[in-house]
Image: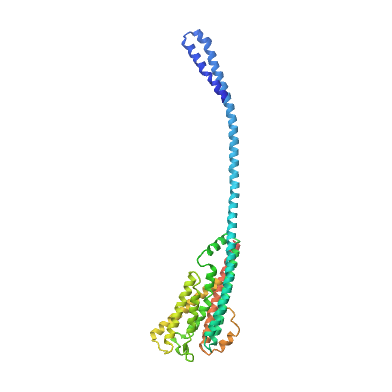
Amino acid sequence: MDQIRLHTMAVPDYMKTAVKILFQGNDEVVEAHLPDQLENIRVIADDCLALAESTEMQFSEVINIIQELLEACVNAEHFYGEELEEIKKKIEENNIRKKSSEEAAKHSEKAVKIMEQELKEANDTYKNAMDSLPSGWNMVAMDLVGAVTESFTSVITGLTAIVVQMCNGSKKVAETVKDVKVMTSSADGLDEMNIYSKSTEILTWTGHIQQYVQENYIDWKSLYDQKNKSTKTDFVKEQFQRISCSLEKFPDCKPKKKVQKLCKEAIKICKDLAKYAPDGKYEKEKTKELTEKISELIESARSFDCKSKDITKTPSLIPKPPMMFKEESKSERKSASGRATENARFRIEQSRAQLKNIRETYDKSVENMEQ
């Protein structure tokens, strides 16, 4: 480029000389000197053209090299960009797994504490209830044992299932994210599992209320204990009050509200029964209304128990404690057999529904594996 600049600097002088020669008006002088000036300009132009072509070739080579470097950079950016994204995903996945593992450890520790607390509460409940239970109520005592035992079993089964689910969730990122989101709710899975475990007791005590009702008739005579001068559902009311009080330690959630509603309705029914049981007099319309409320309570308790069995993964048919069948057969109430039959029918239907859900889950799993 400098050579071209130096060559072109001489062109103006040659042009001036050529112009002077032309303006002299002498043809001989023009013919003698003008061709030399024009030749000098032509030589400079040819030299500049040659230099420009040489410069163009050099710049073309540089441009080609730059283009190759640019393509290499783009390819490297694409390749390393994918690796960088994979590394970022791995880091995020490891962070989520770490958080999930920490949460699972905390929840496992909490689950153990809940089991210990539930065992202590079950023992205290049994002891206090047996101390306050009137003599001769062997059937109620056995039902109490069965309800407390099954409730504690539901807690253990449910807590074990949810802890295992959280631990397995760390194997897949999607499941881990889901588990972590679940853990951040006001009432975590462990609290809800503990609340759902109350369903067995609720269903048991609502069954005790139901045994004094036959269609639109209430057996006031059997309902009132003449010997102890008390209504036999008073003990049931105390159990519902205990269950309701035990929910205060849990955060607000749908299961808690449902159990509180069931306990509130059951306590009100027990109070109404205790109010009219001593006299055994109750208006026909009021009796019908009360029996309808009891039926609704039973249906709600069964619905909640089905939901509980599904959540806690507890089987519907659980072996009864020893001597339970013997005590049932020796029960002095004729309605006990009818109640046992109805409860058995409900448990069978509940088991059938659980089996259907298990089959549907199995079919879906097979379809996913085939895909």
Is residue 333 shown above or below 117?
Answer: below
Which residue occupies the foreground of this view, 287 or 136? Answer: 136
Task: Specify the color scheme.
Answer: rainbow
Query: Can the viewer see residue 35?
Result: yes
* Residue 50 picture location, percent across and down: 58, 24
Q: Quadrant of residue 144?
A: bottom right
Query: Can the viewer see residue 314?
Result: no
Identified at 56% across, 18% down, the residue is 43
* Residue 366 picture location, percent across and down: 60, 65
* Residue 54 picture location, percent across and down: 59, 27
Is residue 144 shown above or below 314?
Answer: below
- The image quadrant where one finds the N terminus is top right
Is residue 367 shown above or below 132?
Answer: above
Q: Residue furthest bottom?
A: 227
Which residue occupies the foreground of this view, 197 or 37? Answer: 197
Identified at 58% across, 37% down, the residue is 67
Q: Give the number of marks.
A: 0
* Residue 72 picture location, percent across and down: 60, 41
- The image quadrant where one finds the C terminus is bottom right
Which residue occupies the foreground of this view, 60 or 224? Answer: 224
Q: Quadrant of residue 151?
A: bottom right
